[in-house]
Image (spheres, grey):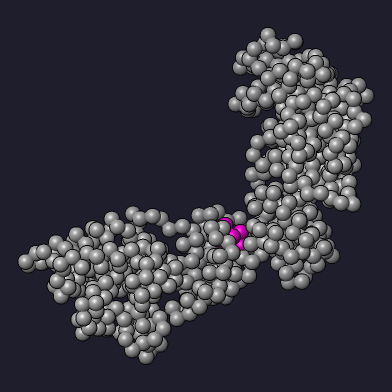
């Protein structure tokens, strides 16, 4: 590192060029910075004996160039200042030219602005980053043509200032000999990015995308940077935009290792150093085309792959993208056919839907998906499809018994992404009827048959247990359908809703034509029918495991309850409810408030609202006068609230 104090004259003089690296931001100075600089220069200009004025630092690193070419320096720090001074000298030269002082114009131009005997990019003393380059060249050749860009605004600002009775000769002398800087010239052993980062620690921090671009291009020969930028980086940037950091992160995880956002830069550096920057960028570019398809599935040519990718995008599982990049790469390399890729994408959908229905927490998916492809390589199966199924089966994949029961009891509709996932489930049911002419379901919304707000008519219709029925079954599968008339139906009576359902072109709504009443009994019956359909739509893809099917708890007698490994001897379903609520209150008392909000007729602090209140804890009471069916459904929903797995809440019963 060579550090020295100098003035701007020797900085510009000679056959040389300052190249602003890609990791620098575009020109960003505005009127505030221009006025500050002008005020400093004008004070020197107005002084009889102007002293040296310190302008800051200029950090450069010599770039590799051909022996007979221009001496090039990468401009690591100081681009805003030096570019602005360049624009001032350009404006000064143009004013000389307009006043007929051609010799002085040529002097400024050939000494400070251009390398007169060079061509192409080598012609310019300063070469801005690619984002600013075309604008910069346009100002140099046609400054009178207005451009909506801060560079042109800066040129115009200083041109107007210089035209106000300024002695251009004196001003040129001030700029070239009275503005001092500290010149820091790095050598090959210095890390230019670290220097840049330390010098700009008070400014806006660089984004992950900046960091990625920085290191890639710092590792590419300066003579090839523009070509590589144009042919590789810019197309990738145009494809992915702000998604580049997440794409790179997912790309880095294709090998199976989970990588935090904060570690992306360091991992990337290591891989680039091992592979070589150009080769690495080439590979990134190829995979960015695949990633673009995940973000915009409509761009996929194969209609079956496109439709499945659309569903996966709706499921909002970007955590699966490291795995998808590997699978999609097999297809692009013609290792697998389109049909097998579609089947594998559907396996992922199956996996996600079953976990969603069974309330398996999704916060571990970002750790589950990345290593799957590596694990697949170790599985001895003939097809990648079978390898994928075996790998995912071992990752908390719900079995048939739990899937069926949760389809009948779980609250599917709710906040966040629950609406999207529930709509996909209903759409899959409708598609399973295999219409000859399948209409688009895009304009359909989820309709609650028993409405979200009960009218007096609905309360009478549901009977004495209307509040419990509403709380337990409102958002369950049996009470949900699709319609284009959601706002019109609102909380109309069931009779009126049935009339509208009968006019629907959807097969699932023809079910209601023979239903006279809509209560918990009918909701459970429909849930059972739809559950059977979904068991076929999303079949268990693991090894078959026989399990007893508790299709109805009515008439059964429980004798054992196991919660989180602790066994309780029970004699009635009321005992099951009591012990389940006790575990909830002991392990997660903070959840009682949410449970009270969701089930106000079942849990609360006011004992008077219950028909047969039982004290729980912490001033909470619960309704104990419930049927076996209501208790079972309520407990299953509490299990979801607690995010317990299928083996962490089990009952044993006798008939």
> In this image, 167 relative to 555: left or right?
left
> In this image, 128 relative to 297: left or right?
left
Q: Position of residue 10 (x, y in %)?
A: 22, 78
Instruction: In this rendered view, identify the residue nearer to me: 629 or 22.
Output: 22
Q: Chief secondary structure of the magenta span? A: helix
Is 15 covered by the magenta stretch?
no
Q: Position of residue 254 (x, y in %)?
A: 65, 62
**Figure check: 275 above or below 264:** below
> In this image, 525 relative to 70: left or right?
right
In magenta, the rendered stretch is: 246-251
Rendered image quadrant of residue 464: top right
Number of labels in the image equals 0
Rendered image quadrant of residue 285: bottom right
**Figure check: 583 above or below 182:** above
Is 248 covered by the magenta stretch?
yes
Residue positioned 82% across, 19% down in the render:
461
> In this image, 436 relative to 51: left or right?
right
Instruction: In this rendered view, identify the residue nearer to me: 319 or 180.
Output: 180
**Figure check: 262 above or below 412:** below
Q: Which quarter shows the C terminus? A: top right
Instruction: In this rendered view, identify the residue nearer to me: 370 or 134.
Output: 134
Q: Position of residue 439 (x, y in %)?
A: 81, 49
Q: Position of residue 605 (x, y in %)?
A: 63, 15
Residue positioned 64% across, 57% down in the render:
295
Residue positioned 84% across, 44% down in the render:
430
Let me know if residue 108 appears in the view. Answer: no
Q: Which quarter shows the N terminus? A: bottom left
Let me know if residue 299 appears in the view. Answer: yes
Rendered image quadrant of residue 326: bottom right
């Amino acid at each position: 590192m060579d550090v020295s104090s100098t003035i701007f004259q020797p900085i510009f003089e000679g056959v040389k060029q300052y190249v602003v690296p890609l990791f620098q931001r575009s020109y960003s100075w505005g009127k505030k910075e221009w006025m500050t600089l002008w005020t400093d220069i004008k004070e020197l200009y107005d002084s009889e004996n102007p002293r040296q004025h310190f302008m800051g630092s200029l950090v450069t690193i010599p770039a590799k160039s051909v022996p007979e070419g221009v001496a090039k320096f990468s401009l690591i720090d100081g681009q805003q200042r030096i570019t602005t001074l360049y624009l001032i000298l350009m404006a000064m030269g143009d004013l000389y030219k307009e006043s007929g002082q051609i010799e002085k114009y040529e002097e400024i131009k050939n000494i400070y602005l251009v390398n007169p005997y060079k061509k192409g990019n080598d012609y310019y003393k300063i070469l801005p980053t690619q984002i600013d380059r075309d604008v910069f060249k346009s100002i140099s050749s046609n400054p009178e043509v207005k451009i909506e860009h801060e560079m042109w605004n800066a040129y115009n600002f200083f041109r107007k200032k210089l035209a106000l009775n300024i002695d251009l000769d004196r001003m040129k002398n001030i700029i070239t000999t009275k503005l001092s800087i500290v010149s820091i010239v790095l050598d090959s052993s210095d890390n230019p990015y670290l220097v840049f980062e330390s010098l700009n620690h008070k400014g806006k921090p660089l984004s992950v995308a900046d960091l990625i671009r920085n290191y890639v291009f710092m590792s590419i020969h300066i003579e090839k940077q523009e070509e590589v930028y144009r042919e590789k980086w810019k197309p990738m940037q145009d494809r992915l935009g702000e998604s580049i950091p997440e794409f790179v992160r997912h790309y880095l995880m294709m090998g199976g290792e989970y990588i935090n956002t904060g570690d992306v830069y360091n991992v990337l550096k290591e891989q680039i150093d091992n592979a070589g920057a150009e080769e690495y960028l080439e590979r990134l570019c190829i995979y960015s085309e695949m990633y673009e398809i995940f973000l915009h599935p409509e761009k996929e040519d194969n209609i079956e792959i496109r439709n499945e990718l659309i569903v996966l995008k709706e499921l909002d599982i970007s955590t699966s993208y490291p795995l998808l990049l590997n699978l999609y790469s097999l297809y692009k390399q013609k290792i697998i056919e389109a049909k097998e890729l579609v089947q594998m994408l559907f396996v992922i959908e199956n996996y996600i839907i079953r976990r969603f229905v069974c309330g398996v927490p999704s916060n571990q998916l970002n750790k589950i998906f990345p290593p799957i492809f590596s694990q697949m390589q170790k599985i001895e199966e003939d097809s990648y499809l079978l390898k994928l199924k075996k790998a995912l089966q071992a990752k908390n994949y719900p079995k048939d018994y739990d899937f069926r029961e949760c389809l009948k009891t779980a609250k599917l509709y709710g906040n966040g992404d629950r609406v999207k996932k529930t709509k996909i489930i209903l759409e899959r049911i409708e598609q399973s009827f295999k219409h000859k002419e399948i209409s688009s379901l895009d304009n359909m919304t989820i309709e609650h048959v028993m409405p979200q707000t009960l009218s007096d008519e609905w309360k009478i219709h549901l009977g004495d247990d209307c509040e419990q029925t509403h709380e337990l079954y409102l958002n369950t599968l049996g009470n949900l359908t699709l319609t284009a008339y959601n706002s019109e139906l609102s909380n109309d009576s069931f009779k009126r809703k049935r009339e509208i359902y009968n006019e629907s072109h959807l097969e699932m709504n023809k079910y209601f034509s023979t239903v006279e009443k809509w209560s918990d009994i009918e909701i459970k019956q429909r849930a059972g029918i739809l559950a059977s359909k979904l068991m076929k739509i999303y079949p268990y893809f693991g090894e078959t495991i026989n399990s007893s099917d508790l299709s109805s708890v009515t008439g059964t007698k429980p004798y054992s309850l196991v919660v989180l490994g602790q066994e309780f001897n029970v004699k009635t379903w009321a005992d099951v409810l009591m012990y389940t609520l006790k575990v909830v209150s002991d392990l997660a008392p903070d959840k009682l408030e949410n449970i009270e909000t969701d089930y106000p007729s079942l849990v609360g602090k006011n004992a008077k609202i219950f028909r047969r209140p039982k004290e729980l804890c912490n001033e909470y009471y619960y309704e104990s006068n419930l049927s076996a069916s209501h208790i079972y459904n309520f407990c299953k929903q509490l299990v979801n609230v607690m995010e317990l797995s299928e083996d962490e809440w089990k009952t044993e019963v006798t008939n």
